[in-house]
Amino acid sequence: MAKKSYRQAIAEALRQEMERDARVIVMGEDVAGGMGAPGEDDAWGGPLGVTKGLMPIFGRDRVLDTPITESAFIGAAAGAAATGLRPVAELMFVDFFGVCFDQIFNQAAKFRYMFGGKAVTPLVVRTMYGAGFRAASQHSQCLYPVFTHIPGLKVVLPSSPYEAKGLLIQAIRDDDPVIFFEHKAMYDEEEEVPDEPYAIPFGEANLTREGDDVTIVAFGRMVGFANQVADKLAKDGISCTVVDPRTTSPLDSDTILECVEETGRLVVVDEAHPRCSMASDIAGLAAQHVFGALKAPIQMVTAPHAPVPFSPSLEDLYIPSPDKIEAAVRKTMAS
Amino acid sequence: MAADIKTIVMPKWGLAMQEGMVARWLVAPGAVIKAGEEILDIETSKIANVYESPVAGPLRRTLVAEGETVPVGALLGVVADSDVGDDEIEAFITEFQASFVQQAEAAVGPPEPQMIEADGRRFRYLQIGEADGPPVVFIHGFGGDLNNWQFNQEALAAGRTTYALDLPGHGGSTKEVGAGDVAALADAVTAFLDAQAIDRAHLVGHSLGGAIAAYLALKRGERVASATLIASAGLGAEINMAYIEGFMSAKRRKQLEPVLQLLVADPEMVSREMIEDVLKMKRIDGVEAALQKVIGAVFPGGRQALLLTDLLGDADAPVQVIFGAEDQIVPAGHLAGLPSAVPAHKLSGAGHMVHMEKAAEVNDLISRFIEG
Amino acid sequence: MQLSREELLKAYRQMCLIRAFEDTVHEEFSAGNIPGFVHLYAGEEASGVGVCLHLTDKDCIASTHRGHGHCIAKGCDVGGMMKEIFGRADGLCGGKGGSMHIADLSKGMMGANGIVGGGPPLICGAALTAKTLKTGGVAIAFVGDGGSNQGTTAESLNLAKVWNLPAVFVFEDNGYAESTASSWSVAGDLVERGKAYGMPARRVDGFDFFEVWDAAREAIERARNGDGPSVLHVKLSRYYGHFEGDAMTYRAPGEIDAVKAQKDCIALFKRRVTEAGLLEPDQLAAIEDETAREVADALVDAKAAPPPGEAKLLTDVYVAY
């Protein structure tokens, strides 16, 4: 076991699953890079180098560079999945879903239901999300609520390198289409990650902190922020449970509701926009099922209902921060 | 002068420990403490445990308040006889703190586990210490790994070579367990000894590891300098299958916590991270199948398959047995059936993880037994 | 290359089966017995059958919203299809898909598709599977003239060529995308579009089964041999509206009657094989009777079959959730 980055953990999961199962292939724009170009082969490994090194091991037949053609290659991944491969397609930025969503939500997600249970579509779409890179409105969105809305899809938001490896291995072994969200600001975060392959089951929330006063439900990158806040507030005598649902579909609502019942206070932290978001979803669940246990109004810490701005001064205001989370926890404690 | 001043420092429990919190002082300045006396509760992210004093004498000063977290090696208290002046103690502390900071900066990393290929199988092991003479080899129990010896290995490494290995199916070792029974696992340990070029070793085995050590003492006596069997399997038919089944079926922290609490007399000892580590281990590819195979071979029908009690009196190597009086996994009553030639120790206030719960006493028993 | 007697009989049988099926669905829909809406393939039979006669179960096709003919040509069970269209529990898709989503992956039928242009990317994937796993299979995208204008289709042509996939894109141009004429909506020429992507492309008379069969043979062999994708632009006509209930006021008076009288693909086939002495008229008549009976039986069974119960509402969303 050694410290590995989020990027290394994802690459290791891909490599180990490709070694284990010859049906696993990787495809996407520049996943190797340099295809047909006069310079170096395997030039990129994706824009942030996550898949670099796979092509020299597995060859161009299993690490397929595509033209810039999301609708064709995401659809091809769906078609390949339905016919016997286990493709891992990289949708470079989730913001590009607009040009290929039909292939995901009308095709891959619905095959099994429309075809009366006879289709198996073991497709993984890996995609980068999240703000913080000064990448402006079309390369910074979260959008996982959109995918979570669609029956037939599973949606995964790994919150650390350990989580990323185990959840990606589960995604690849899973027989349903999975959208795997990688936060672009987390690739260099490090922690201990086992060298061996391991799978973390979907739909089982992880309690990263356990406390008595407030339940903080946070998603993806926000889990780390929530942990920071919980650790800080513990010194002030405020004890927080932090719930990392790991997957928004399936969602471990039982664990979330149990924690809310135990603490009586709920703060939801979601980097997505507030309308029809995970924040509003979790708040709705709590209001519907454990209203009587609530000691204070539910607090939601989200990005605003606005596109992600470019200017660093604005983007820093836009992203839910540990300070905002702390303020929300203190507010719910005060009422 | 400083030779008369003894230190109590934050201990290092296991490889990952970098800091610890003083949860509670059990003695106050002025008290005369004995070596091995429980003097404070320490909590790390991995474990909460009581710390037994390595030194004896009047406790002159405590330097860390309850609730404070300090790095491993930090000065917690000073022990010195009354003829040492307060000014000398102040000077000692000043010097210690100055040099401690320097040490921390120059710190070399802790020993890291290594991998070795033995008879076609990969083993993970941790070596601490290097000295002549037969090394000490620690063999953990069912579902454990080399970290189970975090309170023992370093303590016994002074003047000795020590190895803690991960058994097949466990930790970082191969997930191939062969037949999965005690004989197959004992063969794996023998292969490990061969690969390390160890002719004879002092074996220290816990639970299933105890049965393996006992088996080797009986069948491969020429390789065994001594065997210490801790909360050992192989000494009676009873085994708490509710624990074994709970260990296997628990997928979440909430389910696993009450199961792991069966291992210790004080359930508070089981930390969240200890539970998380077990869950992480169980998720590794091949672990579940390997453990199931071991269960089927070692505990068929919910009873222990291999009973060695009657044979132990005839073992070529000296054997001793240690149990925690409150063991809820393997009953301490198994001590009663041992041949009289085999030293038996029952430690009160401890459960199945007696080597962690009463580390100083167990380390002392092992050390004295080895020195013969 | 010549068709064997068995192949000719099979071709005729399938075309008759499709025609009988679609005529029956037309009548039942008009009588209000079928829920939702249906798009019928009558008139286009030579295309689906002429292509699929070259295929086995290891080959895949993706169809369109007008998919019944492709399903039958690819070997889907007619009884199961009829039940599906009636929304019955033991329909081919358990009554959950209906006319626009009939599929049978075990037959290589990847589904009719409610999204115009939905199929071509999927076919790139099926072809990639065949290529990666070296199954020797090919994958065929049936696309309408409407679907030819979708970005997915353009992207798929490009990707299939770039990846050198064993794929064939069959554009079934029946002259109308819904009510809009392909002569207006398709800029340029579909054969030229295929050529522009660097792949062989051929215009085919879709009323002539033999021409379709021959062109498909060439394209499918090329794909199987690893020589990459091709385009077929099949010109044909549909006898019914875009969907059932479409009054087809956009079509010329007498247009359909003229096609039926002069170019009906089944009639042309029949004339050709009997005139050449390849098949006897009574053999063909027997097939006509037999297929009509098969469809009539399927209809009786479908009407009598129970609908899915509430227990089926939430099954088959996931393999495991």
Image (cartoon, rainbow, N blue to C red):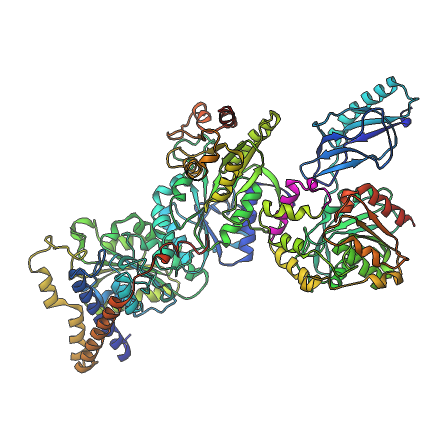
**Between A36 and C273, the one nearer to me in the picture:** C273
Give coordinates of residue C247: x percent, y percent: 12, 55
Compared with residue A46, is residue C272 higher up or lower down, i.e. above or below? Answer: below
Q: Quadrant of residue C259?
A: bottom left
Instruction: Give the tally of numbered discs.
Output: 0
Q: Is residue C177 visible?
A: yes
Looking at the image, residue A305 lies above or below residue C105:
above
Q: Residue at x 73, y 46 (%)?
A: B148
Magenta span: helix, strand or loop, mainly? helix
| Relative depth, front residue between C289 and B199 | C289
> Where's the N terminus of chain A, which quadrant?
top right
User: Residue C161's quadrant in the figure?
Assistant: bottom left
Vertical placement of residue C31 versus A92, above or below: below
Q: Answer with left or right where residue A122 lies relative to residue C171.
A: right
- In the displayed structure, does residue A77 sit left or right of residue C240? right
Q: Relative to C100, is B276 above or below?
A: above
Residue B74 rendering spot, x and y as whole percentages:
76, 29
* One can see residue B180 in this view: no
Q: Quadrant of residue B318?
A: bottom right
Residue extending furthest top?
Answer: B87
Q: Residue A289, image x and y in percent?
A: 44, 40
Q: Which residues are magenta?
A: B264-284
| Residue A198 part of the magenta segment | no
Residue placed most toward the observer, C35 or B226: C35
Residue B14 in the image, given as x and y percentages of width and height: 73, 41
Q: Is residue B279 magenta?
A: yes
Relative depth, front residue between C301 and C56: C301
Q: Which residue, as the protein is rendered here, is positioned at the far left?
A: C253
